[in-house]
Amino acid sequence: MFSKTIFKQTFKSNIRLWLIITVILVALSTLIIGIFNPDMMERVLGFMERAIDDPEFLARMQQEISLINVLGMNFYAGMGLILVLIYIIITANSLVVSKVDRGSMAYILSTPIKRSTVIVTQAIYMIIALVVMFSILAASGLVTAEVSHGGVFFERFTDDVTAVAEEAGMEEAYVAADLNMILENPQLLAIGAEARGIEVEVYAIYLTMLIAQGDDMPQPERTPEQTAMEEQMETAFVDGLEAAAEHMEIEMIELFGDLRALLADHEALGVAVAASGLPVEHFVQGIYMQLAMEEIFLDSRFQFDIGDYIWLNIGMFLLMFATAAISFFFSCLFNLSKHAIALGAGIPIAFYIFQTMAMVGEDLEFFRYFTINTLYNPIDIAAGNGFAIQFAILGVIGVILYGLSVVVFKKKDLPL
């Protein structure tokens, strides 16, 4: 059921296109991973805040600015998917129907080689080509992430930990494991704050939050009175920010993205404090806490979860495995290339268009039920949502269609 001779011939005939697509995929993926910069993404989001009056959308975008999410949205659900789709359409056509159309398939079948051997070998080539393509893509991405950002194969340390370790003459791992050492030493605290480019007060709160996150000791339960007081202070703080935004003639969300501007504007700060009813030191402390949380969020965006990344690649492979099976099936079904391409290319392209339309808005969301592309959602993978059933469906679709392709090709009439 497998011919090494046919496989070698197929390999030689299709290797050039495979190399071109694979090189482009690797280049685009490594470029996105290599240039990823949360600060740059924050500036892009800042421009969006000025142009888009949709707080819910902007809040969602704020959460999605991470390396895995940016890679998923821009590559695995965009450019990368289109490139692999082009490769599949061209290759599936050349493997079977193109040979039938040109008459070379009749020559191959005039030898003792069985039809089943020919078609199974072509199907195996298609699958192996995709497996190797995605294996190289995944491996190059992991290496690029480690070289550019670290934390993939080896532990990544933030700039402040590195700077403090150099000053103290200690290992970075030792400093990262004992952040209290920085917090309790004013000199090291100043060095760490300078390395991160933030105020010492903000850096101290940032360290305190990190230490609390890593503390396994159970936290005491808040009393109803404490909870009510915290909610009251949060409401007062927001009231102050709203008053400051109105005074500065900017949107609330824009002010929230640049609280340091409020600290620098003493007149606006006075308006905010007066509107909040809080003591000035408490209001400023609230701003420092918000800035500290931004630093923690900034750190999390550099995290490159190997598991999520591998699942991104597996999911896209399964989608392309099923898509390739569709194109391969029609390549086996028809004897003319124009007919095979009409459906073998038309259906996968329609699936991509339907998915894109479903993402535009709620009015067009029903299109998601007319495409298998919605079974692969990179954002769901990064968010840890369930995707096992969707991936299994894609795998089953591919296996069934490849099986039908073999049956159809064995039974159909071929032109001599």
Image (spheres, rainbow, N blue to C red):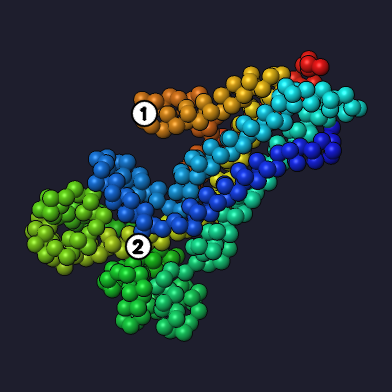
| Residue visible at 44% across and 75% down in the picture | 162
For residue 349, above or below residue 37: above
- In this orientation, does residue 273 appear? no
- The residue at the far front in this view is 102
Q: Residue furthest bottom?
A: 169
User: The C terminus appears in which quarter of the rendering?
Assistant: top right
Q: Position of residue 141 (x, y in %)?
A: 56, 54
The residue wearing badge 1 is 362
Question: 182 or 163, which is in the foreground?
Answer: 163
The image quarter in which residue 42 lies: bottom left
- The quarter in which the N terminus is drawn is top right
Image coordinates of residue 54 in percent, x first then y, are 27, 40
Which of the 4 image quarters holds residue 16? top right
The answer to whether mark 2 and mark 1 are in CB contact below 8 A is: no
Residue at 79% over, 26% down: 104
Q: Which residue is mark 2?
A: 295
Amino acid identity at mark 2: Glu
Q: Secondary structure at mark 1?
A: helix
